[in-house]
Amino acid sequence: MENIDWDDIQACLNGNNEAYRSLVQRHEAQITKLMWRFTRNRSECEKLVEDVFVEAYFSLKNYKGNAPFIHWLKKIGTRTGYKFWKKQKKENLFLPLQDFDQLKECSDESVDPSIAAEILHSLLEQLTISDRMVLTLMYFENCSTEEIAKRIGSTRAAVKMRAMRARKKIKEIAEQNNLFGKLGWTF
């Protein structure tokens, strides 16, 4: 672990709030990037980032220093994002794929990247939260199966199996909604 993180953690535990502010400023960009994977809404993303740092602050005494501080923060971020998805699913706040029916058939080059991203996130929303978590960490965060297993408290073999099944499910959903033809995507 970086000495600067450890020094700030110890100072924070001794009541120095400026030390925690330094930790937040040092790691905020990486946590924001992670939380953006859970929501495409800026205000929700900011709230999730805040939730991560609030939980980290109140749990700081539990941090052992066995791994870099950012790894610990990302684990908290992953749990925070998972809870957010569960709440969204419960409240049924997802954008249905039928909203993309107005798309005309096109090639990869003519698809607006923001529309393609929205469609991809809508496809992911159709998966179970566990499947969505594995694919998000694997493809958006470029995590290895070993790192995903550590973050979600699973085994590497289970992560590999879940990823394989999730890719199959997302392909089936895309085929059912004729998204390959509309977007010119190949799977």
Image (spheres, rainbow, N blue to C red):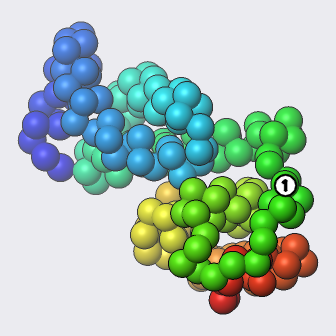
Tell me, yes or no, if residue 55 can be seen here. no
Residue at x 67%, y 39% (from the top left corner): 84
Which residue, as the protein is rendered here, is positioned at the far bottom? Answer: 186
Residues 118 and 16: in front is 118
* Residue beneath disc 1: 99
Residue 89, percent from left and from top: 82, 45
64 is higher (above) or lower (below) than 67: above
Residue 64, percent from left and from top: 31, 42
Disc 1 residue type?
A: Asp
Residue 12, percent from left and from top: 23, 19
24 is higher (above) or lower (below) than 158: above
Tell me, yes or no, if residue 160 can be seen here. yes
> Residue 104 occupies which quadrant of the picture?
bottom right
Residue at x 81%, y 40% (from the top left corner): 93
- How many neighbours does mark 1 have within 10 angstroms: few (below 14), some (14-19), or many (20 or more)? few
Q: Is residue 18 left or right of residue 127?
A: left
Quadrant holding the C terminus:
bottom right
Q: Is residue 117 left or right of residue 130?
A: left
Residues 71 and 21: in front is 21
Residue at x 75%, y 82% (from the top left corner): 180
For the image shown, how many numbered marks are present on the structure? 1
> Residue 101 occupies which quadrant of the picture?
bottom right
123 is higher (above) or lower (below) than 5: below
Residue at x 76%, y 37% (from the top left corner): 87
SS at circle 1: helix
Q: Is residue 159 left or right of residue 33?
A: right
Residue 59, percent from left and from top: 43, 28
